[in-house]
Structures are given as C-alpha cells and as structure tokens.
Image (spheres, grey):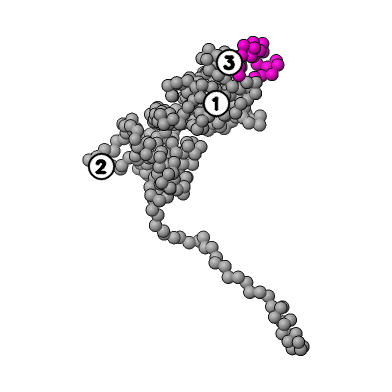
C-alpha cells in the first residue's frame, strides 16, 4: 500500500458515523379516531357479567323517585342499572370513591364500556348511593345469594378481620358543644340568606343557586347530626365536658391508626369466604377495638346467606373469653391466636383450652 492509499484510509476512519433518523413523538396534537365501544373489553370480562347480572334483578325500587316519564318533556334520567353496575364493578376493584369512578370513566376501557363513553358526575354517583342505601344493601345481598346458589360460597371457613378506614374529617373538625351550636346558628342564617337572595336575584344561574343552597343545607344537617353524636360520645366518655364531635363527618370517632398514629376513622369489619375469596358480610363500627365485633359479624353472615359459617378465623384482636364462649354456645369452631400468660382472658382462657373449646394457639390464615 502506497502513501496515498494510507492517507485515504485514515481519512475514512476519522469520519464520524451518520446519526440515525428517528421518528419524533408529537404530543402537542389532536386526533380523531373511531372507537367501537363494544370491543373495549373482552367477551369474558367481569364487567359484562356484572352488567348482565344487575340487568336480571328487580330494579324497580330505584325508579320510584325518577320524575322523568314518557310523554312528558324533560331530560331523561340515568338508568339505575348503569349506576348500580358502576358501583358494583368499582367495589370489586377495591374502589369506593365517587370521584375516582368519575375519573376512571374518562379513560378506563371497562368503565367506558359501561357508560358508552358518556361521562358520569361524581355528585350523581354519590347522591345515588346515599339516597338508595337500603335498596343497594338488599340488592348486594341478592347478588350474594346468586353466587351462593352457583356454589361459589361454601362458608366452611370464613376469614374475618377489621380495618381502620380514614373518615372524611380532619383532626381540627372536632368541636365541643358550644362551638357546634355556634356554627349551627351561622349555617342556619347563611341558608336563610341564600334562600332570600335566590328569590330576589336573577344574576346566578338556577343550577348554581340550587348547588349553593344544597351545600348550605347539607352543612346545617351535618352540624345537627354532630350534636346528636356528641350525646353518645359523652355517654361513653370519662370526661364528658371535654367530649367533641366532628362537624364534617359526625359519625367518625378518633381511633388509633397503623404505626401508632391517631385520627378520625371507622372500624370496618369484613368477613370473607375462604374458598373463593368472596366477601360475605361487611359491617361498620364506631369502636376502635375488635374485641366485641366477632359475634355481630357471625350474625351478619348468617343473615345474608341464611346459614351459619362452619369456622371463623380471626387474629388476636378478637380472641377473648367472651368471644370464645359465644362461639362455643353457637357450636362454631374458632381458629385464632390466644393471649399469652397474664393477657386478656386470664384463667378463663386456660379453662377453655383445657376443655378443648379452642382450636389453635397460633393464627391460622
């Protein structure tokens, strides 16, 4: 190789390789594309089964309050089958917030399939749940009966536990009686003023006037309920004069949270069939302790399904002498942990253990 060839080779090796051409992602654009709603979810998707199941139930109790009727002008009401299906599917996904359901309806395929790509306001969802609480409870028990008839609920073994659910209240929302009555009087005057202004003013749109008035009335009602709840709190308080109730979530109670923190909460009791992991009963308690909650849970299971559970599996929070004796009287097996020496129950638990009325000294889950 001569010198000229060597120089040409060196020049070639010194040239940088060409950069690859990549397609840029443009997110600052708008596109219109067709959507076939029926194909948003698979044929065997759970949301289809829920829709069909609710459609086979008697939904007439939900239609009583609907004012829109055929032959009369006005906007059509939202189908109760849709609202019930939304709540039931959301519950199956562990979602209990109306705002979260509204958000999911904007992008989640299953919720979009249910609504047909129509939006659902969280106020509509929340109002429906609160106005039809008894009918929804009866319907969910009916659905549970369908699952039982299909052989999906055995009740041979039921797992039960409680969990603290944070209330819709801040720590500083708890007030003494004098403060609650003062806030109630302010709320009453505010509602009366809005009612007077609504009759005289034409500046605000009717819907906005109605929304403001409803918010004022709801606040006044919560304060009245807080005063009623305060009576119960005082009855169980060691220092009644210092008792307080929440003005935003009157039924809430201060409870110990995980990691030792305290705050407004409810004690939600959940019973689950061990075979198919189906929730068979749910209860809400204002007591922070689980010690007295097992027997009411057993009664809820029996009431919902018409027969008792075979075994109840619990943790140490439920295991005490009174609970063990109550389960023994029902001839129901109790599987759970026992307090150690000197713990709650004392000699009474030792006697029950010696009689063979307690099945396990360690938690069986």
On the image, the x and y values in percent for residue 265 come to: 56, 29
Would residue 342 be counted in the magenta stretch? Answer: yes
82 in relation to 334, above or below: below
Residue 352, quarter of the rendered image = top right
Element type at mark 3: helix
Residue picked out by circle 1: 160
Q: Nearer the viewer, mark 3 or mark 2?
A: 3
Nearest to the observer: residue 251 or residue 319: 319
Q: Which mark is residue 324?
A: 3
- Of label 3 and label 2, which has the lower sequence position? 2
Q: Residue at x 43, y 29 (%)?
A: 148
Element type at mark 2: loop
* Residue stretch in magenta: 338-359
Element type at mark 1: strand
Residue picked out by circle 2: 73
On the image, the x and y values in percent for residue 171 come to: 59, 30
């Amino acid at each position: 190789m001569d010198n000229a060839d060597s120089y040409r080779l060196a020049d070639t090796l010194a040239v940088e390789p060409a950069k690859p051409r990549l397609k840029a992602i443009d997110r600052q654009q708008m596109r219109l594309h067709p959507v076939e709603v029926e194909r948003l979810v698979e044929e065997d998707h759970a949301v289809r089964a829920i829709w069909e199941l609710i459609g086979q139930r008697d939904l007439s109790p939900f239609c009583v309050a609907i004012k829109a009727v055929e032959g009369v002008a006005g906007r059509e009401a939202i189908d109760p089958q849709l609202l019930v299906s939304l709540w039931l599917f959301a519950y199956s996904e562990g979602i209990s917030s109306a705002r979260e359901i509204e958000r999911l309806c904007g992008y989640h395929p299953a919720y979009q399939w249910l609504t047909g790509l129509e939006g659902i306001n969280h106020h509509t969802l929340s109002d429906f749940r609160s106005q039809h609480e008894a009918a929804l409870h009866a319907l969910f028990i009916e659905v549970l009966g369908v699952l039982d008839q299909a052989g999906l609920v055995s009740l041979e073994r039921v797992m039960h536990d409680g969990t603290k659910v944070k209330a819709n209240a801040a720590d500083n929302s708890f007030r003494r009686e004098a403060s609650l009555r003062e806030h109630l009087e302010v709320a009453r005057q505010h509602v009366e003023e809005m009612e007077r202004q609504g009759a005289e003013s034409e500046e605000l749109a009717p819907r906005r006037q109605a929304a403001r008035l409803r918010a004022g009335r709801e606040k006044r009602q919560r304060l009245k309920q807080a005063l009623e709840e305060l009576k119960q709190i005082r009855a169980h308080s060691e220092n009644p004069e210092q008792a307080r109730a929440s003005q935003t979530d009157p039924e809430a109670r201060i409870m110990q949270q995980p990691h030792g923190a305290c705050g407004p909460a409810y004690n939600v009791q959940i019973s689950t069939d061990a075979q198919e992991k189906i929730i068979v009963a749910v209860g809400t308690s204002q007591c922070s302790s689980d010690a007295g909650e097992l027997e009411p849970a057993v009664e809820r299971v029996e009431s919902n399904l018409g027969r008792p559970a075979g075994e109840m599996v619990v943790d140490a929070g439920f295991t005490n002498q009174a609970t063990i004796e109550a389960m023994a009287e029902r001839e129901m097996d109790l599987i759970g942990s026992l307090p150690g020496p000197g713990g709650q129950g004392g000699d009474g638990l030792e006697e029950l253990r010696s009689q063979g009325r307690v099945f396990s000294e360690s938690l069986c889950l």
